[in-house]
Amino acid sequence: MTTLDVTTPKRRSYGSLTLWAGLALVGLHIAIGLLTLVWTPYDPTGMSGGRLEAPSWLHWAGTDRLGRDFLTQIMIGSRIALIVGTGAVAIGVLIGVTLGILAAFASKLLDDALAATLDILIAFPTLLIAMLVVAASDTANLASAIIAIGIALSAIVARLTRILAKRVLLMDYITAARTSGSSWPAIVFGHILPNIWPTLSVNFALQFGLAVIAEASLSYLGLGAPPPNASWGRLLQEAQGTVYTAPIGAIAPGIALVSLVIGINLLADGLRDSIDPTRRAR
């Protein structure tokens, strides 16, 4: 008589629940960001009410210190966060994966030099590197913030790519491919990237969350997207002087930022549970 294993379905159900919860939160922000391209409750730069009005039927989240609809500002913030996250991760992936693959194929001396450089860069906080890049560009705008955060994230991606690629290069099928005369590009695109991409994709999701937080931090410090861009970080900075008289100004962008980051982390956990066979087995 066989026994029925009830632990695996529960584990898979939990992983599926985590994935769907992350997709729901991230999908909500994506939908809001896309909606702002064609419609917002009010003109983002127009003064549609009095200063610091409380939430009402006309202004569901109230108004800011200039009389602009605060819900509109929060919705625009979703679009900016997604643009920065996507752009920064794309830059980080392009630079990081390229450097990681080159380090995996490099000689021992060059590999050690690249590994030491990456370790030094990773030792610095992402926000600090982004601040230095923005300061060096002499312009604080959305494009410079995306480039700065992308460069800061590339070191993490490069280090992980190097580790995974060197592990794949030790496999027997790589030796067989080399023996059969396969070129290095064929080995990279035919064997290495397909094998390391599932693990990298989970890391990319986590880097997206770091990029969103870094952009909000830069905007809070005045180094991110300038007005009239309604970044969540800038909204938090503007609300710190009126946090007691109009607390919604600090609460709303904080909730929006936290919900997006939590959604991204849940999505990354769900992807890891779906991709990693050992976690599925446990």
Image (cartoon, rainbow, N blue to C red):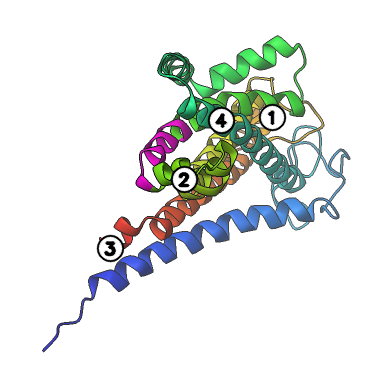
Residue 218 placement: quadrant? top right
Q: Secondary structure at mark 1?
A: helix
Looking at the image, do the residues carrying marks 3 and 1 touch, with CB atoms under 8 Å apart?
A: no
The magenta stretch is 161-172
Residue type, mark 3 in image: Ala
Disc 2 to disc 3, C-alpha distance? 31 Å
Judge by depth and name the residue closer to the eye, 68 or 3: 3
Classify residue 279 as left or right of residue 175. left
Disc 2 to disc 1, C-alpha distance? 39 Å
Q: Which residue is mark 2?
A: 177
Residue 265 lies, with reference to residue 159, above or below; the image says below
* Residue drawn at x 46%, y 55% as measured from the top left: 271
Q: Is residue 17 visible?
A: yes
Q: Secondary structure at mark 2?
A: helix
* Residue drawn at x 52%, y 44% as measured from the top left: 193
| Residue 205 screen position, x and y as percent | 53, 45
Task: Say the numbered circle drawn on residue 281.
Answer: 3
Going from N to C along the chain, the mark reached first, 3 or 1, is: 1
Task: Say the numbered circle drawn on residue 146.
Answer: 1
Looking at the image, do the residues carrying marks 2 and 4 touch, with CB atoms under 8 Å apart?
A: no
Residue type, mark 4 in image: Gly
| Residue 154 screen position, x and y as percent | 56, 28
Assess disc 1: are there few (<14), some (14-19) or many (≥20) residues with their C-alpha within 10 Å of its C-alpha. Answer: many
Front: mark 2 or 3: 2
Residue 129 lies, with reference to residue 79, above or below; the image says above
Q: Secondary structure at mark 4?
A: helix
Q: Which residue is mark 4?
A: 96
